[in-house]
Image (spheres, rainbow, N blue to C red):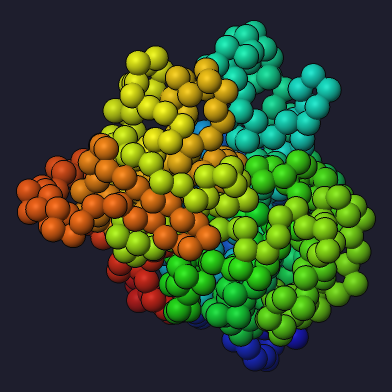
Amino acid sequence: MNPLNDASHDGSGTAAAPILRSREWFGDGGKNGFIARHHLRAMGLGGQNFQGRPVIGICNTYSELTPCNAHLRLMADAVRRGVLQAGGLPLEFPAMSLGEPFLRPTSMLYRNLAAMEIEEQIRANPLDAVVLLTGCDKTTPAALMGAASADIPAIVLTGGPMLNGKFRGRDVGSGTDIWRMTEDLRAGRISQEEFEEFESCLNRSPGHCMTMGTASTMACLTETLGMMLPGGSGLPAVDARRGVLAEATGARAVELAGSALTPSAIMTREAFENAVRVNAAIGGSTNAVLHLLAIAGRVGVDLRLEDFDRRDIPLLVDLMPSGRYLMEEFAYAGGLPALIDRIRDLLVPGTLTVTGDSLLGNCAGSPVYDDEVIRPRERPVQPAGTGTAVLHGNLAPRGAVIKQSAADPALLRHTGPALVFDTVEDYLAVADDPDLDVTADTVLVVRGAGPKGYPGMPEVGNLPLPKRLLDQGIGDMVRISDARMSGTAFGAAVLHVAPESAAGGPLALVATGDRIRLDVPGRRLDMLVDDAELERRRATWNAPASLADRGWTRLYVEHVNQADQGADLDFLVGKSDSSPGRRAF
């Protein structure tokens, strides 16, 4: 396909199908076209740039407030080279950057805002295709959601994972080893000096978390969905081959311009089915559940929470937090194309990608170079059915999730008394109290951490263990909340309980001392309290006062859907289009 179109504003050349969207702006021979063109001339762009060249937007989530994405400035330059080499006109624009390290109360509060901004910038501007530069956790799903709603040809390039951390002769992983070392510090197993030395060794390069956290998970799933060039999810951020990939991404965006290969044509029901299956095989983050549900909603795909409970896919990628290695090893072992080819019989064939070929076609013959990192099917890290489990019961009528591969197997069937806290701050205030009434059988319950209640649904579900238990050598316990947890985290944490407590879900009715039964093999989560007692409690329950009184947070709380629907805003769900807005002149 040649998407170039020489229908220029001065009447030269012959218009060729497909008509480029940017011609609505630059192809007008009168005042409107003049205004659009002459402002580009102010940037030193000559008239040849308006002669039907595809206009490629470079949507950049670079920000020094998002350290994971701080190198995207260089990636944008490489994309620009590729666009120019292929005959397109690159125009870079910024988008809200969502960084896990700094944003409060939680970056998840702003995912939908970033998606809205990206959608509107794409739709409102003279773009024929867009390259989405992303990296840190929420930037990738936000970009996919926005691009899906605008639905012009789009292609993603993630910034890539950072190099492995190195601490005292061993590899350490962002997030995963932070949780371990923090607990060791609280338990007195390491000194403050060791902890600070570890801090200086963990992040050795630009890039996002090198564990199979949410950023790496969403990169892998973006490639699986077909929205990234093959191999793009795994290469380290500082690998020179990522620059080459950026050039190829820019060039491919030019080829996509004006085509029918839009996000809605690529991200089909079958593509989402493959993403769910790959998420199980890589031991992906539970946050992927929320993000895939939200993205699917933007393209009108009926993806449901129950679709994520895959009992037929083994865990094959041996990466932290479920395994031993990090993203560097995954990339060098062959990366996602090698995994895809290894499990091709478990995937739906024929799903299109931004290459124009199918996912399985892109990955055909991709070798695995290290069977320890990407395991053969007969020797999985964990057997089929041990990935994300979806639970239901009287404590989670609309569902909850648990990442089995990262939990102590002994806790997957557990009954114990609840110890309930209305906020995470209430729990943290007493977590180190040596007299806290808690045992290894206790079920920690924290509510008020859902989409509406926090607001924004923070990553606090992997609650730090009470110091009293740490001192006894206990390393895991059952924790239940309407919160999320970092994809880098581990533990027997039941998450995303829906409906959340602030919306009147049964989590709001649990009392300290109630017996709670977790049965992951049976996919159940129940409080052993009779219905009459629960109704009595409900009659006296009052919704907590909203913490949102203005601006975006108020809009979010009034319109956010529950976790089982992806926590998107209710008025953003559903297909949209790329129709340019009304003329301003």
In the rendered image, residue 35, in percent from the top left (x then y), is placed at 46, 67
In the rendered image, residue 375, in percent from the top left (x then y), is placed at 82, 57
Q: Is residue 564 above or below residue 267?
A: above
Q: Is residue 397 visible?
A: yes
Q: Residue at x 62, y 23 (%)?
A: 181
- Identify the image quadrant of the N terminus: bottom right
In the rendered image, residue 314, in percent from the top left (x then y), is placed at 70, 63
Furthest residue in direction left, as rendered: 540
In the rendered image, residue 47, in percent from the top left (x then y), is placed at 65, 68
On screen, residue 171 versus residue 61, left or right, reads: right
Q: Residue at x 27, y 43 (%)?
A: 514
Q: Residue at x 75, y 53 (%)?
A: 381
- Identify the image quadrant of the C terminus: bottom left
Q: Residue at x 68, y 64 (%)?
A: 384
Pick the residue in front: 182 or 187: 187
Quadrant in the picture for residue 577: bottom left
Q: Is residue 11 visible?
A: no
Pick the residue in front: 180 or 77: 180
Q: Is residue 82 above or below residue 554?
A: below
Q: Is residue 394 above or below residue 299?
A: above
On screen, residue 87 versus residue 298, left or right, reads: right
Q: Is residue 7 above or below residue 158?
A: below
On screen, residue 459 versus residue 259, left or right, reads: left
